[in-house]
Image (cartoon, rainbow, N blue to C red):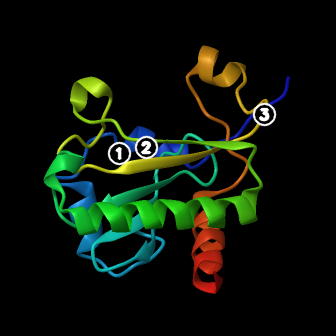
Amino acid sequence: MQHLFSPWRIKYIQQHARPAGCIFCLALEQSDSPENLIVRRTGRALVMLNRYPYNNGHVMVVPISHQPSFELVDPATRAEMMELMTQALTVLRSLYHPDGFNVGANLGAVAGAGVADHVHLHIVPRWGGDTNFMGVVGQTRVLPEDLSETYARIRAAWQTS
């Protein structure tokens, strides 16, 4: 029998309760680090890794302004978010060489937003054949790279781009 190990999942399993407050606003209060997963911060928005990614390199673009939907975010912030999304695509292409990306947002809890009150964009690198039986049968994702390594790689690449 073969064994697949995903040791980072134990933190999620054991700490399934969410912290009080908005996870993005809480991260904003800290210095950028592997603990809060912020890889890039500008005056109006930030880019951070998803703590429970769908694929390696899964990042989110988040406005500093705590708003539930894009139409409530000022135009300058929306423009900065789009620029950060474009930069994220460039960084992720150079590091991971994906075949494509999913880019999108879930607006509202009924649309699947895990954090419905602070709008954000997801950028998920995709590769041909990156889906397998684990997601369907075991409802588990198998990622070949530890989150701390992903953080270090993306942060370093962003600083040199």
Image height check: is 155 above or below 18?
A: below
Q: What element carries label 2?
A: helix
Q: Residue shown at 64%/64% (left/top)?
A: 90
Image height check: is 118 above or below 82?
A: above
The N terminus sits in image quarter: top right
Q: Image quadrant of residue 110?
A: top left
Q: Is residue 160 left or right of residue 71?
A: right
Q: Do the residues labelled 3 and 1 touch (CB within 8 Å)?
A: no
> Residue 12 bears which disc, if any?
2
Give the residue number, with chain letter if any, for mark 3.
128
> Residue 15 bears which disc, if any?
1
Q: Do the residues labelled 1 and 2 touch (CB within 8 Å)?
A: yes
Q: What residue type is labelled 2?
A: Tyr
Cα separation, mark 2 vs mark 3, equals 28 Å
Q: Residue shown at 58%/84% (left/top)?
A: 159
> Residue 67 bears which disc, if any?
none
Q: What element carries label 3?
A: loop
Image height check: is 60 above or below 115?
A: below
Q: Residue shown at 29%/80% (left/top)?
A: 43
Instruction: Give the image location of residue 105, x and y in percent.
Output: 37, 40
Regarding residue 26, the answer to whether it shows in the image is no
Instruction: Give the image location of residue 84, x and y in percent.
Output: 46, 66
Regarding residue 151, the answer to whether it shows in the image is yes
